[in-house]
Image (cartoon, helix red, strand yellow):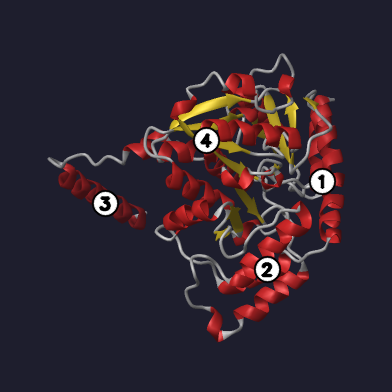
Amino acid sequence: MIFKSLEYIKNAKILLIEKKMNEGSKVIEPAQRVKEVKEYYFSRKLKEVAAMNANGADVISLGIGGPDRMPSLEVVEKLKEEASKATNHSYQPYVGIPELRKSFSEWYKNFYGVELNPDKEIQPLIGSKEGILHISMAFLNPGDGVLVPDPGYPTYTSVSKLVGATIYPYKLTESNSWYPDFDELEKLPLDKIKLMWLNYPHMPTGAPAQREVFEKTVDFAKRHGIVIAHDNPYSFILNDNPQSLLQIPGAKDIAIELNSLSKSHNMAGWRIGMVASNPQFINWILKVKSNIDSGQFKPMMLAAAEALKAPKEWYDEINRVYKERREVAEKIMAALDCKFDPKQRGLFLWGKIPENANGSEKFADEILYGKHVFITPGFIFGKEGERYIRISLCAPKEKMEIALERIQNDKN
C-alpha cells in the first residue's frame, strides 16, 4: 500500500510538471501529410487480436498475407556462411551487389522470358512496399493525378496521399472480372494523370494476369503519357503461367515493374524486392532511394541471389502446400455462405458476403469475436470491396481446419 501511494504521488507530480510546461506553449501539430492517412488497418487490428490472445482467446489468424514457411535450407545456409565473414558487415552500395542484380536478371529471363540489363534496368529494394514510396516520390509532384485500383492494395492510396498527389480511383468490378474498364478510364481528366498502379495477379481479388489486359494497359499509357507501375509479387502462387507486364513489346518504355521474394520464396521478413524498368526510370528511382535508405545487408543479398536460382520444383512444392490450404479456405467460404470465383490466383481467397450481411467490417468482426477467427474485411481495399472478405492461405492446414470446425460448429 505504501509503495502504491508513493507511486501515485510520483505520477501526480509528473502530470503537474507537464501541465505547467504546456501552459502558454504553442500546440504542436503533425505535418498535414500525417493527418491525411490513418494507421494501417492491420497495425491496429493485430494489436486487438494480440490482446484477445493474451486473455486466452486463441484467435486463428487468416488475415495477413505473410508466408509462414521458411526459405530453402540452401538459402539459410548461404546466409549463415556469409554472415560469419568479417568483411560482410559494412555499408553496401545503394544499387545492390552485382550478384543479386544478375540473379534477378536471370530469374526474369528464365521464368518470364524478359531480358533485363542487370547493371541498368534493375534496382534492388528493401521490399517492394518501400518501392511504392520511391516510385511515387520519383514521378509525382503535389497535385499530380494517380490512378489507384478500387479494390486495391491500401498502400497505393496512403503513399499517394503522403506525397500530396490527387487520387483518381478506378473501379474494378466483379461483373468485369476485376479488370480495368478502359472505356471508363478514357473519360477521366487524363491530362492531369501521371501514374497508374496496376497489380495482376490481383490482390485482393485473385484475378489472374491476362496478356490482353497488359496490352491494353500499355497502349492506354503510351497514348496518354502515363507511367504504369505494375506490382507483381503473386505471379508464382497457385499459378502455372507467371506473367510480367514487361513481356509486352514496348512496355519498358512506359512501365515499371515491382517484384519481391516475400511470397515466392518465403522471405517476407528479409525485405528483398526489386524494381525493373528502362535505365532513365531506374536512375530517377535511385535518386530517391539513395536519399531515403541504404544498401541491404550483404549476406542477405547473397542469400537472395541463391534463392533466385531455385528450380521449378521449388515453386511446385510451395504450390502443393497452398493448394491444400486453398481447399480448406474454400470450405470456410462455403460455411460462411460466401461466394467466390475458383479461378482466383495468389495467396488469398476473395469471397462475396451474404446479401443480408451488414457490411464486411461487421461481418469479419462477428467472426473474430464469436468464432475467434480473424479474416480481412474487404472495405479496407476500397469502396468496391465493401461486400467482400479475404482469407489468407498463410496458416498451416491444420489451423485452417480448426477455424473451419469453429465456424461450422457455431452454425450448427
Give the residue displayed 83% in from the left and 48% down from the top.
Answer: 398
According to the image, label 2 marks what residue? 305
Q: Nearer the viewer, mark 2 or mark 4?
A: 4
Give the residue displayed 31% in from the left and 50% down from the top.
Answer: 8
- Give the numbered dot on residue 241: 1
- Give the numbered dot on residue 389: none
Measure how far apart labels 2 and 4 are at the Cα level.
32 Å
Determine contact: label 3, label 4, CB under 8 Å.
Answer: no
Mark 4, Cα crowd under 10 Å, few <14 / some 14-19 / many 20+, is many
Give the residue displayed 36% in from the left and 53% down from the top.
Answer: 4
Determine contact: label 1, label 2, CB under 8 Å.
Answer: no
Q: Give how far across and how far down residue 310 sits, in percent.
A: 78, 64
Residue type indicated by callout 1: Asn
Determine contact: label 3, label 1, CB under 8 Å.
Answer: no
Mark 2, Cα crowd under 10 Å, few <14 / some 14-19 / many 20+, is many
Residue type indicated by callout 4: Ile
User: Which quarter shows the N terminus?
Assistant: bottom left
Task: Out of 20 and 230, give the one closest to the viewer.
Answer: 230
According to the image, label 4 marks what residue? 226
